[in-house]
Image (spheres, rainbow, N blue to C red):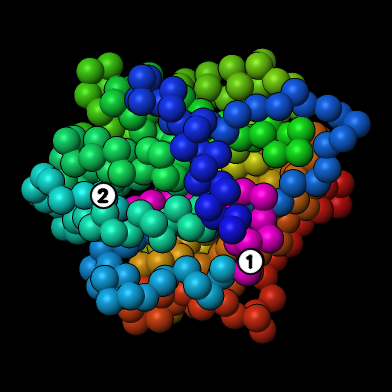
Amino acid sequence: MRAQIRNLILLLAIWGNFLTDGPAAEPSAPPDAKTTETVEIIYVGDIMLADLPGKFIATGGDPFTAFAEVFEQADLVVGNLECAVGTTGKPIDKPWTFQAHPRVVPHLAKYFDAVSVANNHTGDYGPDAFLETLDHLRGNVGYFGGGKNLAAARQPLTFEKRGLKIVLLGYNEFKPRSFAATDTQPGCAWGVDEHVLEDIKLARQRDEHALILPYMHWGHEGDAEPSERQTTFSRQMLDAGASAVIGAHPHNTQGWDAHADKPIVYSLGNFVFDGFERPDALVGWVLRLHCDRQGVASWEVLTARIDKNGIPALDKTATGPSWKRGE
């Protein structure tokens, strides 16, 4: 029932997006500091719905069912969609290319409020197929980090939950750079420092109490620890007004940190993804944020174990890291 209601709300709210081709947002209600409660937001890492996960869906499977109850309890569920969605275009010349059939969209819409399209795979089948991906998402799942041009790609996706405004931003830092949106070309928002910091500062100027969450696609694949770039720029984003920094791309988790009493989770690893044999790529974090008008109050992670078909299961025995503001 929650998914159907959410889809109806999104459908109404996204109407303006057909005119602007920018990310969609839920309608906002006036924030009220007296009535704002704690809001729970869930982030997952890389979601790739082609290849074996795509075949699993085609035969009637649901790749997210193991986390259905976890998602149902959250106010907002966000992931990184690491594939094109559609039937047009041709794979570009790169080692790995992924395009999922549009039949996967209802599965996303059932569980996810929003997905980032700022990564190194949503452009795998060319710019027209990237636009087709956005067409399939529009009206079904909110998206951010990409658009018909650079201005649209940098537009935040905004939600309002219990009086708390939540601003989602997405940026890609991994090649090919040809996937980056320009003034005239569709694509993803590239992680240009000035753009990222400017977008965060602008969002903060618009609402001093907003929760501003940049989702970064960065880091070196297979690295167990974040790079100097990740650690340094995370702090710059937090100093600019971000409430937390969340990342993905290395296909494994990379630990966490805090700065100015705000959290950094460098990489959530995989969530739905096949084709990996190294053990660290078969474990992903499901990040559960507890937020209020002061920012992220606390977080913890649930552990996803990914099988040979790329499908995650909840490991109820695993104990992951956690954090509380002020500690």
Secondary element under disc 1, as helix, strand or loop, is: helix
Say few, some or many: other residues with alpha carbon within 10 Å of mark 2 (under 14 / 14 to 19 / 20 or more). Answer: many
Q: In this view, does 51 lie to the left or right of 36?
A: left
Q: Is residue 76 magenta?
A: yes
Q: Residue 110, how many percent across, how many down?
A: 48, 58
Q: In this view, does 32 lie to the left or right of 73?
A: right
Residue 82, relative to residue 317: is it above or below? above
Q: In this view of the protein, which residue sits in the foreground, 191 or 293?
A: 293
Secondary element under disc 2, as helix, strand or loop, is: strand
| Residue occupying the point 63% across, 66% down | 70
Q: What residue type is labelled 2?
A: Ala
| Residue denoted by label 2 | 84
Part of the protein shown in magenta: 69-82
Disc 1 versus disc 2: distance between alpha carbons?
Answer: 26 Å
> Which numbered disc covers residue 70?
1
Asked whether the viewer can see residue 241, the reply is no
